[in-house]
Amino acid sequence: MSAGTNDAILVQILAQLNALQVSQQTLQAKLDALTLTTPLSPVRDGRQEAPLTSPTSPNLLLSPSALLSRAHLASSIPSMNTPPDHATTDKEREKALYPGRVLLTTYPDQHGIKPFPLQWGVSDPAVRGPVICSRLPSSIKQRNALGAHSGSYSIYRALAIAMGTLDPSHKPDYSNTEPPVPIPPQPAWYDPTKIVSFDPWGHLVPQVFKKEIEELGLDVRPSIAVTKAHIKLSEIDESAKRGEITIDGRVVLPTRPLKNPDGTESDAHPGVEIAASKAAVEPVWYLPGVAERFGISESLLRRALFEDTGGMYPELVTRPDIKVFLPPIGNLTVYIFGPPEHMADETKELTVRVHDECNGSDVFGSDICTCKPYLVFAIEECIRCAQRGGVGVVVYFRKEGRALGEVTKYLVYNLRKRGGDSADKYFKSTELIAGVKDMRFQALMPDVLHWLGIKKIDNMVSMSDMKYNAIVQSGIPILKRYDIPEHLIPPDSRVEIDAKIAAGYFTSGKQITEADLFKTVGRTWEETEH
Ligand SMILES: Nc1nc2c(ncn2[C@@H]2O[C@H](COP(=O)(O)OP(=O)(O)OP(=O)(O)O)[C@@H](O)[C@H]2O)c(=O)[nH]1
Ligand SMILES: [Zn+2]
């Protein structure tokens, strides 16, 4: 056979393969359309039910909930978990949970797809519409948002469903869960450009979208919750002992006397409790608004989100008609000290700190950075402001390690400690590992301030130029900034502070030049060990 004949055969094979691929794609599209147009088989509690028989009595029909609970029982008693039975049960449960074919993606023009109207930034919630991202049969056709609720915790929900500990169609009863303090609508809620990273109606969902939930049976969930708390921090106990924080019976309350190990009352200073209101806010991104904030096109944003989440959300690409995405990232928490209604009242003094998570310092007290001392100082400043008749706000973002993550952060710590931990190398070390020194991109951060009705900030407890610029550019003036007091800077974290000042962070004290940075050196591991 000549080389020419070989080539011709090869071309023919390739053409046939291509044709096969095309017809496979057509078939897939037809199947997709079929799934969404075929009336669903009987629906129980909002979940499609497939008839299944019992492995022991083939004539006995099992409902998905019976299967769920059987499997739950088996998995909760390990000795009952013999592999062959378990495998059969899992297969059956998988069929019961997901009776249809795997629906990899959807398309806007697919039969049966009819997203519930959602107009971001419209003032009337009935016109704005609820955010629906559920893939439950009751909601999948009317879904108007991509992704999943609860940010990264959506994965644990998936696990709970797979293990049979959670019925996916569980319908929460939201009575008595409403906010104990009001966070009422503000003009910024009605501006589609002011709040783009979460749903301003998130805490009012059960009330404002009652009809959609109860009458239309749609799976609409709250993405914000507001509550009250009493917080106790040993650092603030110490400040109270020193008389730097006063008990006013309103913001700062006395703690009940401590007990000795033998149960008798201790005469040690019991410390104080701080009364606060707080809100947990989950991310809900309005993609056109997020893209605009970062100055990129919506299509580029969608493509990058699709690619760099391991192709996890194909509808980012196939459903340009769906404008809202619930990303798998951490939430933010707002702590309010003093009357929440003062936040929107421009006549009241307001102190704010926006803090990004640093678990090593915030929770475990690591002294390599100033995060915890700065956070505690900010809470004290908020308390003082509330006691002067104003209000204090701390916003805590889950953006660990400047949003590079804790693994990257620890790798950089190793590099710094092995390479001579001088301030000139602080940001360079991070860049060497992560490729960038910061991925927090503060542009979305001011949304929460607008949601709270904040129009100006009297006292901003932060040295960050990035936070400052983002807030001021979003239309909220900052009247006074102040840095962390010298005595609160642990010696080893001088490296961080000096590097930040040289990089443009605010300081009311000493200025740092590039040349100074060589002289600021942190502790080495060897020093720690001796
Ligand atoms: N990657 C990395 N992150 C760090 C390092 N040190 C601190 N961080 C992180 O930096 C962030 C500090 O956030 P904030 O406490 O809000 O401080 P800031 O934005 O730098 O500025 P201020 O408002 O002035 O405190 C947290 O997310 C920390 O986890 C480090 O060496 N490497
Ligand atoms: Zn830190």
Image: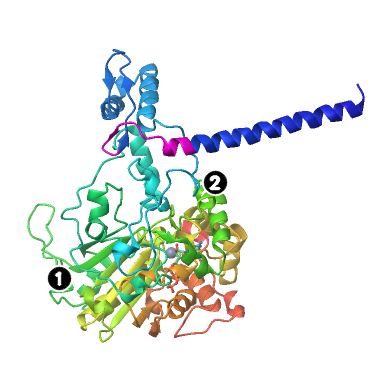
Q: Which mark is residue 310?
A: 2
Q: Is residue 63 left or right of residue 197?
A: left
Mark with earlier residue (1, 2): 1
Q: Is mark 2 within 8 Å of ligand 1?
A: no
Q: Position of residue 44 (x, y in %)?
A: 27, 34
In this view, 219 is above or below 79 = below
Q: Nearer the viewer, residue 286 or 469?
A: 286
What amino acid type is highlighted by mark number 2?
Gly
Name the side, left or right, on which 378 lies relative to 527: left
Residue in view at x 23 percent, y 49 percent: 215
The answer to which quarter of the image holds residue 93 is top left
Measuring from the top left, give residue 405's x and y in whole percent: 48, 56
In the image, the segment drawn in magenta is 33-46
Disc 1 versus disc 2: nearer the observer: 2
Q: CA distance from mark 1 to mark 2?
A: 49 Å
Element class at badge 2: loop
What residue occupies the far right of the structure in this picture?
Answer: 2
What is the x, y in percent for residue 151? 39, 52
Please determine whether, in this image, residue 505 is positioned above or below residue 208: below
Which residue in the rendered view is the most extreme toward the left? 264
The one of 181 and 324 positioned closer to us in this rendering:
324
Determine whether 74 is above or below 422 in the image.
above
Q: Which mark is residue 253?
A: 1
Crowding at dot 2, Cα within 10 Å, few <14 / some 14-19 / many 20+, comes out as: few
Q: Amino acid at mark 1?
A: Leu
Q: Which mark is residue 497?
A: none
Q: Quadrant of residue 230?
A: bottom left
Taking depth in this image into account, of 376 and 314 the one nearest to the observer is: 314
Check residue 78 for magenta coloring. no
Q: Nearer the viewer, residue 506 or 399?
A: 399
